[in-house]
Image (cartoon, rainbow, N blue to C red):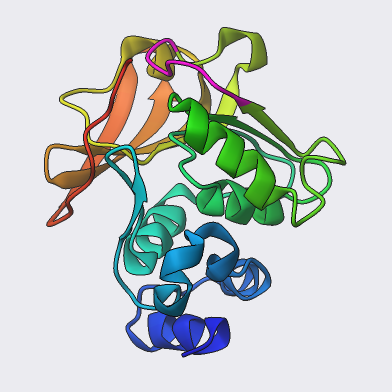
Amino acid sequence: MSNQELVKQLVTDGVLKSPRLIDAFQHINRADFVPKELADQAYINAPLPLGFGQTISQPLTVAFMLELLQPAPGDNILDIGSGSGWQTALLACLVGPAGKITALEIVPELYEQSIKNISRYDFIKRGAVRMLCANATAGLAAAAPFDKIIAAAELAEIPPAWLNQLKIGGRLVAPIGHSLTLIIKKGEGQLDRREFPGFVFVPFVTS
């Protein structure tokens, strides 16, 4: 199976819909972000272990989350739990030259791996991606406000700092329990919340 065949499968399954998102999945090869020993499984529609209790998410799940997030050219996005960097690179592709992705990863080894993997593309070199090894509970006020925020680890609730750092009109996508949650910030203290059940993620870690 190839990356193009994986993308075709996601389109056929009705998960990958937006033309820009389809282009990003075609441009950013998942094989660049999986461990070498799992290279032959890179295009399987399943999560794969990265070590340290973390995974690279199932392609279907990443596609579903990004369709909910609706990344747009020029967006300033906070990517929480970058793992091996695949979603970060997809986001950088989607926001284009005028956009900015700030990616937080708490596991030092995965932080280093993210940098190595994403450097296969030009996003870090041209300043489109900023990587930080940090606890993401407090978000990153210095880079706020964000147009979009996305997290790839299961939480019990959304940290208040994330909501505070989200622009009015902004979108936040994160797993709460076994549901993906979309929050659209309509105004200060005005949140439109939608839940999509049936997903499993690794737990959000703070140390």
What is the count of numbered marks?
0
Q: Position of residue 159 (x, y in %)?
A: 31, 16
Is 163 on the left or on the right of 180, as rendered?
right
Asked if 104 appears above or below 67 in the picture, the reply is above
**Magenta stretch contains residue 71:** no
Is 47 or 36 nearer to us in this picture?
Answer: 36
Q: Quadrant of residue 158?
A: top left
Is 131 or 177 nearer to us in this picture?
Answer: 131
Is 192 or 116 nearer to us in this picture?
Answer: 116
Which residue is at 35% across, 80% downward?
14
Q: Quadrant of residue 184?
A: top left
- The range drawn in magenta is 132-138
Q: Does the magenta stretch mainly form a helix, a strand or a loop?
A: loop
Whether residue 54 appears in this view of the structure is yes
Whether residue 72 appears in this view of the structure is no
Which residue is at 20% across, 23% downward?
157
Q: Quadrant of residue 206?
A: top left
| Quadrant location, the C terminus | top left
The residue positioned farthest toward the right in the image shown: 126
Q: Position of residue 64 (x, y in %)?
A: 36, 61
Q: Position of residue 123 (x, y in %)?
A: 77, 46
**Magenta stretch contains residue 136:** yes
Q: Position of residue 99 (x, y in %)?
A: 74, 40
Which residue is at 66% across, 55% downward?
94
Asked if 188 appears above or below 66 in the picture, the reply is above
Is 134 on the left or on the right of 72, as rendered?
left
Which residue is at 40% across, 58% downward?
62
